[in-house]
Amino acid sequence: MTADPPLRPEEAEDLEQELALISHQQFMALQKCSYLRMSETEAGEYDKRRIRIGEICALLEKYKSD
């Protein structure tokens, strides 16, 4: 297994912006969920964002620790 190439500052900034956007989407989904149940489609999208948030956090953790 090869190591991922280091992130460039521009890539890290793009990931941080994506993280902010999808984190806000997660927040809004949870706000709505407290009043109404999520549809199956909404739940699927929520899960996809949750996984992506984990991926971005792992990438940014490596970037900031270098």
Image (cartoon, rainbow, N blue to C red):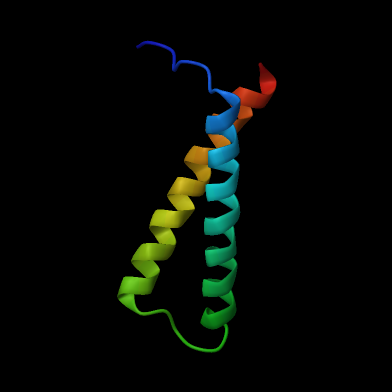
Residue at 38% in and 72% down: 42
Report the number of numbered marks: 0
Tell me residue 7's x, y (percent): 53, 23
Q: In the orientation shown, which residue stands out farthest toward the left? A: 41
The quadrant of the image that shows the C terminus is: top right
Q: In the orientation shown, which residue stands out farthest toward the right? A: 65
Tell me residue 32's x, y (percent): 54, 82
Q: In the orientation shown, which residue stands out farthest toward the top? A: 2
The quadrant of the image that shows the N terminus is: top left
Q: Is residue 38 left or right of residue 33?
A: left
Tell me residue 8's x, y (percent): 55, 23
Residue in front for this viewpoint, 37 or 16: 16
Residue at 44% in and 48% down: 51
Tell me residue 12's x, y (percent): 58, 32
Up-down: is 31 above or below 45? below
Residue at 31% in and 75% down: 40
Residue at 35% in and 79% down: 39
Residue in front for this viewpoint, 34 or 13: 13
Up-down: is 41 above or below 65? below
Q: Is residue 42 left or right of residue 64?
A: left
Q: In the orientation shown, which residue stands out farthest toward the front? A: 10
